[in-house]
Image: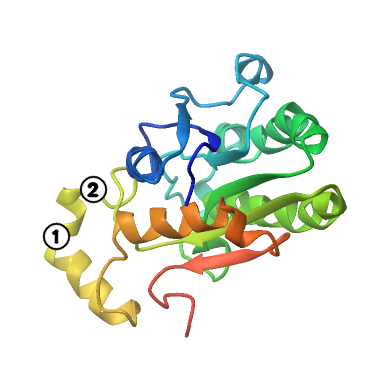
Amino acid sequence: MLTNKRILITQCHDFMGPTLVDTFRRLGADVIASEPALNTPDAIEHLPTDLDAVVANLAIPAPRSPILDSTEDEWRETFSVLVDPLPRLVRRVVPGMIQRRGGKVLVMGSASALRGMRNASTYSAARGAQISFVQAAGVELARDGINLNIIAQNFVANPTYFPPEVQANPKFQARLDNEVPLGRLVSAEEDAQFAAYLCSDAANCFVGQVFPVCGGWVQR
C-alpha cells in the first residue's frame, strides 16, 4: 500500500507514533520518525522536505482543568504543541509536494472537538482548531494535488491517552461500556491501517475531511 513512499511521522514515541511507524514500515513505506514535539518555530527546520506524506502526530497530556481553573500557561502550552506546528509543517513540506504534483498531509486529531467534554475546554479547543485548519487549508490545497485530512479519534488504544493502567481501571471499563457503542477500544493497529490508507494513492479524493475513529463515541 505504501511501497516506496517517503513518509514523515512526528512525535514518533507519543500518541499513535509507535504503531504508525511500525505499521507504515510493514506496508513498505520509507518512514522518517521524528521524536521531539514541534512546539517552537526552529523545531521544524531539521525536517526533510522531499516527502510523499506527512503524518502530524501531535500530542500532549490532556489538561483536565475546569474552565474557571484553567490558566494562560495551560492554554498557551497546549496550543503550542497541538496547533502551532500545523501551518509550519505545511509551509515546510507542501512546496516540495506541489513540485512533485501530489502529496498527503494527515493530522492525528481528537474527537473531543466533536462533542462537549467536562473539564476539557483547553484541550478540546486546541483539537477543534486543528479541525478548522484542516478543513480550510485542505480545500485551498486541493487544486495543487495535496490531500490534507484529519482523523478525529477517541477511545483508541495508545500510550499517551489510554495506557494499560487506564484500560485496567474498572471505572474506565464502565465508562467504555456506557459511552462507546462499539463496546471496546479501537485497536492501535486498526487506526494505523486507516491512516495508512489515507496516505496511500487509493485515497486521492479526500480533501479537508474529518474522519471520526472512535467506536461511535460521537453519537449521543
Amino acid found under the numbered disc labelled 1: Asn
Q: In the rendered view, how is the structure colored?
A: rainbow
Near-viewer residue (170 or 142): 142
Q: Position of residue 81 (x, y in %)?
A: 56, 33
Q: Is residue 128 left or right of residue 98?
A: left
Q: Is residue 127 left or right of residue 10?
A: right
* Callout 1 crowding tier (Cα within 10 Å): few <14, some 14–19, many ≥20: few
Q: Residue at x 73, y 26 (%)?
A: 92
Near-viewer residue (4 or 144): 4
Task: Examine the rendering and report whether any part of residue 164 can be seen.
Answer: yes
Task: Examine the rendering and report whether any part of residue 156 can be seen.
Answer: no
Near-viewer residue (133 or 196): 196
Q: Position of residue 200 (x, y in %)?
A: 56, 52
The residue carrying mark 2 is 163
Q: Residue at x 26, y 72 (%)?
A: 175
Amino acid found under the numbered disc labelled 2: Pro
Q: Position of residue 53 (x, y in %)?
A: 60, 40
- Residue 169's label in the rendered image is 1
Note whether 73 is above or below 115 in the view shown: above
**Distance from Cα at disc 1 to Cα at disc 2:** 10 Å
Mark 1 vs 2, N-terminal side: 2
Q: Residue furthest front?
A: 3
- Residue 54's label in the rendered image is none
Q: Residue at x 31, y 79 (%)?
A: 182
Q: Is residue 203 left or right of residue 117?
A: right
Circle 1/circle 2 CB separation < 8 Å: no
Near-viewer residue (97 or 214): 97
Q: Residue at x 42, y 50 (%)?
A: 64
* Callout 2 crowding tier (Cα within 10 Å): few <14, some 14–19, many ≥20: few
Counting the numbered discs, the total is 2
Note whether 127 is above or below 92 in the view shown: below
